[in-house]
Image: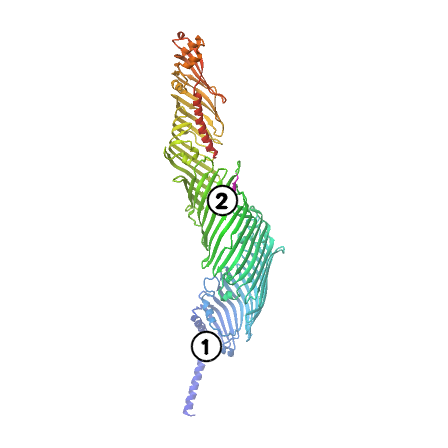
């Protein structure tokens, strides 16, 4: 052997030895090398591998156990067994993969990537677009743990993926899904060839659903499908939901649930057309609803036709899903039909058409009609009948929608409306994520009657003309945003307010123009502004009219001002009104920190004088409220402000001076109403055609205004009253009591003719035509009395006391059995030329009598007054005495009928009484 050959043999032997040693080393350390290789590949994707056990590796297989990867251990396998032929392995494929105990976490809640930290594996796999020949893969005891917003669920998997031939892949899977929403078992068998043709079958068995809205005891179905080049050639599916329970409404006694026997759905598709049919049946096999949808040419320009019909007793429908009470009787009929064209279905994914924006690319027409027949709700509504009609057309983002509503009876809170009709012809436009709606022409709404609400009812039909209804709906990331502007005007109508023992009060209303603008943002409260202009209100029985009423409303503010309002004029429509026309303005606001509590501030008066104020508070939730009314102190003066400026009914009062004020308070709750008030008159003087009042002072406290009453010992003082005879220093103590209200006169004192006059306890009833008094007279000066009654030639001295029973009845005064007696002897002087002429020649006795009266010293004197309703006053003066210079002081007993103006004086007093009585009668008539 040459030297070169010898060296070559040595090198070959060395290389062979190294190869043998390397092979032995790789074989000895094959397990840790494979583990390191797998770990390295995962680290390249930033995926941790908490555990891995390589049990064995040979020239044709690999066995792994306890594989766990992912930061949150999203994937775990108890065992993975991979088998191959060396020739196939060198070509990059393996024969089979057997997995058992495979568990994977899948997060569909949207809070993080679906595969968690394993998401990079999915991304890197998508980078390789070359065809992959899959080995035979089998799953045993495997599961996918799903986390979602609807709850957690587990999908148990068992099955095979087999691509034994190079051109066909077979997939066979058995799955069982369990979770809080229900469970189901499913079987899938699919074949996929190299040309992308797919066909297979799927079945669902032993399914059930448990949702808050429904309980479905059985859910089954099967489907067969065939796709060629990823285009559907044939799809047929049947699904059956059986024994469906919907929770009953708590407003029905006893609570019950709706039970449906089954819901059937079938889907049939070929390469051009698709059809979906659905039916819902009750437990008595009664057809409740039926759906039929067809789509022709759905892959290109889908031509849609949808028909939905429902006709069944109302109890068969899930009203509680709409937040409504369950009807106890009646039926519902719904018919809906929509047809037209939409964009190709695949563009919904490729072109980003989401939400309702696909309507911009659609052309649709449709009609719908909902009819309610004899619907009844326990303790709320009986025999509710109504029709709702919709007619619409939509093309290229614009369309028309005609809304028609006809109802025999509708309810909204406490309002029950009868024979309601609404017609709203709407124009609709869609621009990307913005919906806009407006009226095509004026809309109409009519209401024939309302059921009484707290004794309030509608006398005449009400008609509403809607001139503007602009609505905008915008889709934004934070949700939907609604904006609107509405304008309407109603015809005049009359409200009736029933009273228990009196005629119903009418309120004639001319509503004027009403506008409402506002908006609603998802997750926030509604914000709006309303306005009322040109409204008027007439109360014919009270002869009151409010004109030019306007209001500005702030809705949804939560706290702060809610409304500002004005009343242009408040009229009392009589020939002699109680008050001059008033203008009123005010505001309503919510009370901070008190839910459902509102406060009101109002001011009113005549031009240039705001003398009336009202403040109030109302708690809507409790029904409690309070109202304070005040007339600010008014100072009257001759040549200045006079009562007739404010109260034309007091036009007869002249030269009024002094100060007047008043205040009242009303409080109410569910238990009833309380009221009180005070009227102050300070140094009031005035002139009336029948009397003159000087320096009147009074404070009247009322503890009830609705049926006026007062505490005892109310006081009234007048410095001077002059109804023809001066009455001075009048002091009256009284009380208002009873129903109807009367004045209980406790005591009245005044100074008259040098003495005092008093009235004892008496009842003055302003509603009665007759009033009786007994006037007590004490220590009246005869000299002053004779001077006032003006009997020709009669003078004298002394003092008399007694009583005068007086009856006022209508315009008549009656006096019976009055008797005034002198308290001590005195002297009268009577010398009359007229009497001397009349009695001339009557005899010596009459001459002596006339002489005796010229200086008559009486020991007894009495004055009697009598007056009937039909005759004049008769005044009889009875005397016992003598004239020391006539017949040696012989005693005479005389009865003289006096001609005097006592009747005129009493008539003047009667006019003063009638004046006060008429004022009181008018005051109490207001109640």
Above or below residue 354? Residue 492 is: above
In the image, is 839 to the left or to the right of 340?
left
What is the x, y in percent for residue 722? 40, 26
Q: Residue at x 42, y 38 (%)?
A: 629
Res 331 visible: yes
Q: Is the residue marked by circle 1 packed among few (<14), some (14-19), or many (20+) residues within 10 Å?
A: few
Mark 2 or 1, nearer chain start: 1
Element type where label 2 sits in the image: strand
Image quarter where the N terminus lies is: bottom left
Q: Is residue 350 above or below residue 471?
A: below
Q: x, y percentage for residue 366?
A: 56, 58
Q: Nearer the viewer, residue 117 or 36?
A: 117
Q: Is residue 232 shown in magenta? A: no
Task: From the top left corner, tell me how far across and down residue 821 is, in percent.
Answer: 43, 17
Which structural element holds mark 1?
A: helix
**Nearest-to-viewer mark from 2 and 1:** 2
Q: Is residue 497 magenta?
A: yes
Q: Residue 731's image quarter?
A: top left
Asked if residue 225 can be seen in this view, the reply is no
- State whether residue 285 is above or below residue 666: below
Q: Main secondary structure of the magenta part?
A: strand
Residue 4 or residue 273, whichever sits in front: 273
Q: Whole-percent x and y of residue 556?
A: 44, 50
Give the residue pinned by disc 1.
28
Q: Residue furthest bottom?
A: 2
* Separation of marks 2 and 1 at Cα, in angstroms: 104 Å
Q: Which residue is mark 2?
A: 510
Relative depth, front residue between 316 and 834: 834
Please state which of residues 151 and 459 is positioned toward the viewer in this rendering: 459
User: What segment is highlighted magenta in the picture?
Assistant: 494-498
């Amino acid at each position: 052997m040459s030297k070169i050959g010898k060296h070559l043999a040595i090198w070959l032997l060395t290389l062979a030895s190294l190869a043998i040693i390397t092979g032995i080393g790789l074989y000895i350390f094959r397990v840790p090398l494979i583990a390191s290789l797998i770990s390295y590949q995962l680290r390249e994707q930033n995926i941790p591998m908490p555990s891995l056990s390589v049990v064995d590796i040979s020239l044709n297989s690999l066995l792994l156990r306890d594989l766990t990867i992912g930061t949150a251990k999203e994937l775990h396998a108890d065992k993975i067994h991979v088998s191959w032929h060396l020739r196939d392995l060198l070509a990059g494929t393996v024969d089979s993969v057997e997995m058992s105990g495979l568990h994977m976490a899948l997060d569909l809640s949207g809070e993080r990537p679906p595969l968690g930290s394993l998401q990079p594996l999915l991304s890197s796999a998508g980078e390789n677009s070359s065809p992959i020949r899959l080995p035979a893969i089998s799953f045993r005891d495997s599961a996918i743990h799903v986390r979602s917003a609807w709850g957690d669920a587990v999908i148990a998997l068992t099955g095979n993926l087999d691509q034994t031939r190079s051109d066909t892949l077979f997939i066979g899977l058995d799955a069982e899904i369990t979770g809080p929403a229900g469970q189901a078992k499913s079987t899938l068998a699919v074949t996929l060839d190299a040309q992308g043709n797919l066909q297979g079958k799927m079945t669902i068995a032993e399914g059930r659903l448990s949702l808050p809205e429904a309980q479905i005891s059985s859910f089954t179905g099967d489907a067969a499908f065939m796709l060629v080049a990823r285009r559907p050639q044939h799809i047929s599916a049947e699904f059956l939901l059986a024994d469906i329970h919907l929770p009953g409404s708590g407003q029905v006694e006893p609570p019950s649930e709706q039970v449906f026997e089954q819901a059937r759905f079938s889907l049939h598709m070929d390469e051009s057309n698709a059809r979906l049919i659905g039916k819902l049946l009750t437990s008595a096999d009664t057809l409740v609803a039926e759906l039929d949808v067809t789509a022709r040419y759905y892959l290109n320009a889908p031509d849609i036709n949808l028909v939905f019909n429902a006709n069944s007793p109302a109890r068969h429908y899930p009203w509680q899903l709409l937040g409504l009470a369950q009807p106890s009787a009646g039926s519902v009929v719904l018919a809906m039909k929509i047809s037209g064209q939409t964009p190709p279905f695949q563009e919904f994914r490729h072109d980003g058409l989401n939400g309702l924006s696909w309507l911009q690319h659609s052309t649709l027409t449709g009609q719908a009609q909902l009819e309610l027949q004899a619907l009844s709700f326990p303790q709320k509504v009986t025999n509710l009948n109504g029709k709702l009609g919709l007619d619409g057309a939509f093309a290229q983002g614009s369309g028309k929608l005609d809304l028609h509503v006809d109802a025999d009876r509708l309810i909204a809170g406490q309002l029950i409306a009868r024979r309601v009709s609404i017609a709203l012809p709407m124009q609709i436009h869609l621009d990307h994520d913005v919906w806009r709606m407006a009226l095509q022409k004026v809309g109409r709404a009519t209401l024939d009657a309302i059921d009484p609400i707290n004794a309030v009812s509608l006398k005449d039909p009400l008609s509403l003309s809607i001139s503007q209804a602009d609505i905008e709906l915008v889709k934004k990331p934070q949700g939907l945003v609604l904006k609107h502007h509405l304008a309407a005007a109603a015809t005049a109508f009359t409200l009736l307010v029933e009273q228990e023992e009196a005629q119903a009060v009418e309120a004639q209303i001319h509503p004027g123009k009403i506008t409402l603008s506002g908006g609603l943002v998802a997750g926030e409260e509604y914000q709006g502004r309303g306005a009322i202009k040109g409204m008027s209100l007439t109360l014919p029985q009270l002869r009151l009219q409010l004109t030019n009423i306007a209001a500005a409303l702030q809705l949804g503010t939560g706290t702060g001002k809610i409304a500002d309002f004005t009343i242009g004029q408040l009229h009392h429509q009589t020939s002699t009104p109680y008050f001059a026309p008033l203008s009123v303005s005010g505001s309503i606001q919510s009370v901070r920190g008190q839910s459902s509590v509102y406060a009101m501030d109002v001011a009113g008066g005549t031009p240039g004088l705001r003398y009336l104020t009202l403040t109030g508070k109302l708690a809507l939730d409790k029904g409690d409220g309070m109202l304070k009314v005040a007339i600010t102190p008014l100072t009257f003066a001759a040549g200045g402000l006079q009562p007739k400026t404010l109260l034309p009914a007091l036009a007869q009062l002249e030269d009024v001076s002094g100060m007047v004020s008043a205040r009242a308070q009303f409080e109410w709750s569910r238990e009833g109403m309380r009221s009180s008030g005070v009227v102050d008159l300070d140094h009031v003087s005035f002139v009336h055609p029948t009397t003159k009042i000087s320096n009147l002072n009074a404070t009247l406290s009322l503890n009830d205004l609705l049926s006026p009453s007062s505490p005892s010992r109310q006081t009234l003082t007048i410095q001077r009253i002059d109804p023809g005879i001066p009455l001075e220093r009048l002091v009256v103590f009284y009380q208002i009591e009873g129903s109807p209200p009367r004045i209980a006169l406790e005591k009245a004192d005044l100074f008259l003719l040098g003495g005092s006059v008093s009235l004892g306890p008496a009842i003055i009833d302003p509603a009665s035509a007759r009033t009786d008094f007994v006037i007590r007279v004490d220590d009246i000066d005869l000299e002053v009395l004779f001077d006032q009654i003006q009997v020709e030639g009669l003078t004298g001295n002394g003092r008399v006391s007694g009583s005068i029973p007086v009856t006022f009845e209508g315009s008549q005064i009656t006096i019976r059995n009055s008797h005034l007696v002198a308290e001590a002897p005195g002297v009268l002087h009577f010398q009359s030329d007229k009497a001397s002429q009349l009695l001339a020649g009557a005899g010596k006795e009459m001459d002596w009598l006339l002489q005796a009266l010229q200086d008559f010293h009486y020991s007894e004197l009495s004055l009697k007054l009598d007056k009937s309703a039909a005759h004049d006053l008769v005044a009889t003066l009875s005397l016992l005495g003598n004239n020391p210079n006539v017949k040696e002081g012989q005693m005479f007993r005389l009865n003289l009928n006096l001609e005097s103006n006592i009747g005129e004086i009493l008539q003047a007093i009667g006019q003063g009484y009638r004046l006060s009585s008429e004022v009181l009668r008018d005051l109490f008539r207001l109640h």
